[in-house]
């Protein structure tokens, strides 16, 4: 055991599992790129006030989970707990909203939340996110949701459902909030829940305790109190999702952990993950830009998908997403002259786009062939002194066991033809 280990709740990603991680992240970003989203690389830490104001002081994320510290200049900074506030900040700072709208951006990387670690809940978590800013069009909400759905489907994930609701807009939400608060304060709630009802009444609807669930079973629901325009928006989103073939369940009690949501709000939930079942979520956030100091009020819609949890969900379903092998070809040199030849051949093969590894360290044939098997390569190239004399090389198909000699000078072409590259 080394003296050091990674900080509590912070995962490492290494082979072979890291190949699944990478494949998942790529599949999700590719789904966004196919819909015209451009890549944005965000700073890993920002001014603390950006998250406090953007995400909301009353959320657990801001009040309990932020990694906040003073830098050497005495500024208070925070490791990003999520990506939406940072994207909005960048859009405002660089005037991206003065260009063509919507601004469609995609990001991926680590986010930090000081939560209690457990299966599927990490203090450094990985997300792929998209944000579409500047156009309030229900068809755009449906596009964002469909990107996530398509990403999951392409990965082969099946055991998930999409919960969908509308959290209303500023013409109906304040009245509803009051109505809900009145209802909740009339119940026999414990002190903490009562306090929550005062600060953030919607969160009480998210309480998982059966006694609270029972008490709030008849609570007024936002969906029954939507303004005409919010209801029309929601109906249109559902219509577009139907046209896109995205299945959803309307869940009027869906509550998200961040404060900025308005209108369309959604969460992807997977059955095979236990308590941490949210594999992705998002929604519209029409008030966020004003909240963090933007001059105009630009609407936005986006999602954050948990890459770690998507990997766990695929594992739970027994789906493998990474390619079979780490490399296509594994070279086995027997002797130093053969090694020199194979090093050069490996270089030429890589230039041609073939993934190649070699048995380094002058290993005996048996051990080297074992390494070839373990690499997952389709082909092994075995070169010894005898072959060198007659300028041939042994080409072994590791899946069938078939073996044949080919001319050393033709090896590259032979490999390309077998691998169909
Ligand atoms: P969020 O629901 O807080 O939304 O996080 C998105 C996803 O990140 C979750 O559904 C979950 O899969 C994953 N996640 C969150 N916390 C953890 C954790 N501690 N460990 C592992 N995975 C985790 C947001 O962050 C919003 N910014 C999404 C968004 C974008 N809304 C609009 N635009």
Image: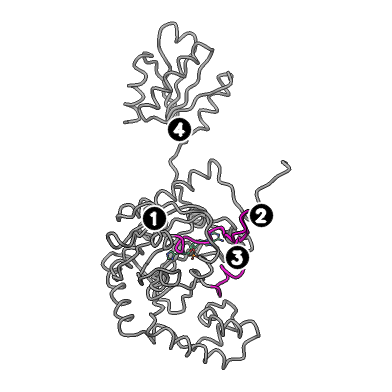
Q: Secondary structure at mark 2?
A: loop
Element on which disc 3 rests = loop
Can you identify the residue that label 4 sits on? Answer: 327
What is the spatial separation of the Cα atoms under label 2 and label 3, in whole angstroms? 14 Å
Residue 334: % across, % down: 53, 15
The residue beneath circle 3 is 65
Q: Which sits earlier in the primary sequence, circle 2 or circle 3?
A: 2
The residue that disc 2 covers is: 8
Nearest the eye: 369 or 412: 412
Q: Nearer the viewer, mark 2 or mark 4?
A: 2
Q: Let me know if residue 22 is in the magenta part.
A: no
- C-alpha separation, residue under disc 3 versus residue under disc 4: 41 Å
- Label whose residue precedes the other's in the sequence (1 or 2): 2
Q: Is disc 1's CB within 8 Å of ligand 1?
A: no
Q: CA distance from mark 1 to mark 4?
A: 29 Å
In this picture, which residue range is highlighted in magenta?
57-86
**Counting other residues with Cα less than 10 Å from the Cα at mark 4, is it few (<14), some (14-19), or many (20 or more)?**
some
Q: Position of residue 137 (x, y in %)?
A: 28, 70
Whether residue 65 appears in magenta in the rendering, the answer is yes
What residue is rendered at 41% in x and 20% in y?
A: 395
Q: Is residue 165 above or below residue 320?
A: below
Question: Which of marks 4 and 3 precedes in the sequence?
Answer: 3
């Amino acid at each position: 055991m080394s003296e050091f280990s990674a900080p509590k709740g912070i995962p490492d990603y290494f082979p072979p599992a890291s190949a699944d991680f990478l494949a998942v992240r790529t599949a999700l970003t590719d789904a966004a790129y196919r819909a015209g989203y451009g890549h944005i690389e965000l700073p890993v830490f920002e001014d603390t006030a950006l998250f406090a104001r953007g995400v909301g002081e009353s959320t657990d994320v801001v009040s309990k989970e932020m990694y906040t510290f003073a830098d050497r200049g005495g500024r208070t900074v925070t490791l990003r707990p999520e990506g939406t506030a940072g994207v909005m900040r960048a859009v405002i700072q660089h005037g991206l909203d003065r260009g063509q709208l919507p601004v469609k951006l995609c990001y991926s990387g680590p986010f930090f939340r000081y939560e209690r670690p457990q299966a599927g809940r990490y203090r450094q978590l990985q997300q792929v996110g998209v944000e579409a800013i500047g156009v309030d069009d229900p068809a755009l909400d449906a596009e964002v949701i469909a990107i996530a759905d398509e990403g999951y489907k392409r990965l082969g994930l099946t055991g998930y459902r999409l919960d969908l609701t509308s959290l209303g807009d500023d013409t109906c939400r304040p009245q509803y909030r009051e109505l809900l608060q009145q209802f909740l304060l009339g119940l026999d709630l414990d002190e903490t829940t009562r306090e929550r009802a005062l600060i953030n009444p919607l969160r009480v609807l998210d309480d998982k305790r059966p006694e609270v669930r029972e008490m709030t079973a008849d609570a007024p629901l936002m969906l029954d109190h939507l303004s005409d325009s919010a209801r029309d928006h929601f109906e249109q989103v559902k219509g577009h999702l139907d046209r896109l073939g995205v299945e959803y369940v309307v869940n009027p009690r869906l509550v998200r952990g961040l404060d900025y949501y308005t209108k369309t709000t959604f969460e992807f939930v997977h059955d095979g993950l236990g308590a941490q079942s949210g594999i992705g979520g998002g929604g519209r956030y029409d008030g966020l830009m004003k909240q963090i100091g933007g001059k105009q009020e630009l609407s936005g819609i986006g999602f954050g998908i948990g890459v770690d949890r998507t990997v766990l969900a695929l594992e739970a379903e027994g789906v493998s997403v990474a390619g079979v092998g780490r490399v296509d070809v594994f070279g086995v040199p027997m002797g130093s002259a053969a090694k020199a030849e194979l090093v050069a051949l490996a270089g030429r093969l890589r230039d041609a786009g073939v993934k190649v590894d070699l048995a380094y360290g002058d290993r005996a044939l048996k051990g080297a062939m074992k390494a070839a098997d373990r690499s997952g390569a389709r082909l092994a190239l075995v070169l010894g002194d005898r072959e060198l004399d007659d300028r041939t090389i042994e080409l072994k198909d590791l899946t069938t066991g078939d073996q044949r000699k080919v001319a050393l000078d033709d090896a590259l072409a032979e490999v390309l033809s077998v691998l169909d590259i």
